[in-house]
Structure formats: structure tokens, C-alpha cells
Amino acid sequence: MERTLYEEEGLALTEKDGELFLRIGEESCLLACHPYEPCTRLYRGESLCAAIHNAFTAEEIRALAKGGTARAVTGSEYDIGRLCRLLAFAVKNCPDCDIGYAEGAVALEGLKALGALSPETAVSPSAVGVQRISDAFSHSKKRKERVMITEEGKVYVRIKG
């Protein structure tokens, strides 16, 4: 029997026969974790659809579903909702990455949604739920969209036109 551990619109974490599943809309992905790294992996059937390195183990995810928070290696704090949204984002946008990269990608989208597109509209990194943003988003000159940091430590997205 399937048991729902967490649910919000379009997203759910369920458990069936001792295994965790992330449901994104109508799609269901099996969560498998390697505790020695740890690496959170999501599978559609036999096919790997996402691997988030240095993320959380299945035991940590189950504990989060019961309440409370856990700190990622990046220093960011996660509750179960935030973790499920990060995993769903990774499945769609960065299927093989480190948790710090996934956080950076989510932060970039969050900054754009907040309208933080200039030094004048910059916000604290905590406004998008991160302690720091991956160098891949703040230092890469190859990216069209880069996260910039003001002298005050606020962040915004610079979009090359």
C-alpha cells in the first residue's frame, strides 16, 4: 500500500514497500540513495533521470518527512517541501549535478522571479533560501545569466543581452 509522506500541488513524496517515490505531476520517480557519498538518485523505471551528488540519504529524507530540517553540505537548511522542490527541479533542469549546483540553478530562477535583476533590486541570498551560490552561476563568463554579488553581499541576476 502506498503512503503519502508529503504533498503539495503537483508534487508528492510517497513510500511503498519500503521504497521512496517522488511524484511530479503524473510522473513517479523512485528515490535511491548511496549513503557513502551520499548521492540522491531518481529513476523512471530502470532509467536514471537525476543524480544529485552530496545530497541526502533515504533515511534523512524519511526523517525530514516526519518534520524538522536538515543542513546540506552547502550550509543550506532543508525541510521536506524544499527538498522535494529541489529534487523535482533537478529532474527537469540539471539531471546530473552536485547539490550546490542545483541550489544555484534554483536560486537563479528565484532571483528572476523576485525581480532581482540589478544592483538596485538585489536581495539577500537567504531570500532564495541559500547560504551561498555556486561559482558556476557567479563566476562563469560563458553563462548568459549570472548571479552577481553587490558590495553589501546582496545578489541579483545579470542577463547578457
Image (cartoon, helix red, strand yellow):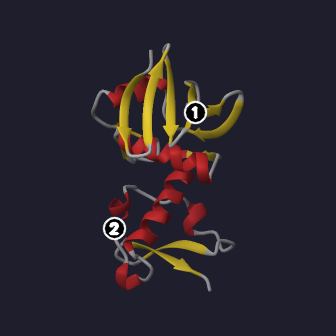
Q: Amino acid at mark 2?
A: Ser
Specify whether 19 is left or right of 50.
left
For the point 39% across and 78% down, which residue is it? Answer: 151
Q: State whether residue 39 appears in this view.
A: no
- Label 2: element kind: loop
User: Closer to the observer: label 2 or label 1?
Assistant: 1
Location of mark 2 (residue): 124
Q: CA distance from mark 2 to mark 1?
A: 33 Å
Q: Is residue 103 above or below residue 111?
A: above
Helix or strand or loop: what does disc 1 sit on? strand
Check the image and report above or below for 21 versus 131. Answer: above
Q: Amino acid at mark 1?
A: Cys
Crowding at label 1, few (<14), some or many (≥20) Cα neighbours within 10 Å? many
**In the figure, 141 relative to 132: above or below?**
below
Residue 161 position, x and y percent, is: 62, 86
Image point 40% across, 47% down: which residue? Answer: 75
Labels in figure, total:
2
Q: Which mark is residue 29?
A: 1
Say which label, 2 or 1, has the lower sequence index: 1
Can I make out residue 56 in this image?
Answer: yes
Q: Nearer the viewer, residue 103 or 149?
A: 103
Q: Which residue: 44% across, 22% down?
A: 59
Task: Describe residue 74's horizontal placement relative to residue 79 as left or right.
Answer: right
Residue at far front of view: 26
Q: Nearer the viewer, residue 122 or 61?
A: 61
* Residue 134 spot, x, y in % from top left: 54, 58
The quadrant where residue 65 appears: top left
Q: Is residue 32 left or right of residue 68?
A: right
Few, some or many residues within 10 Å of mark 2 (<14, 14–19, 20+): some
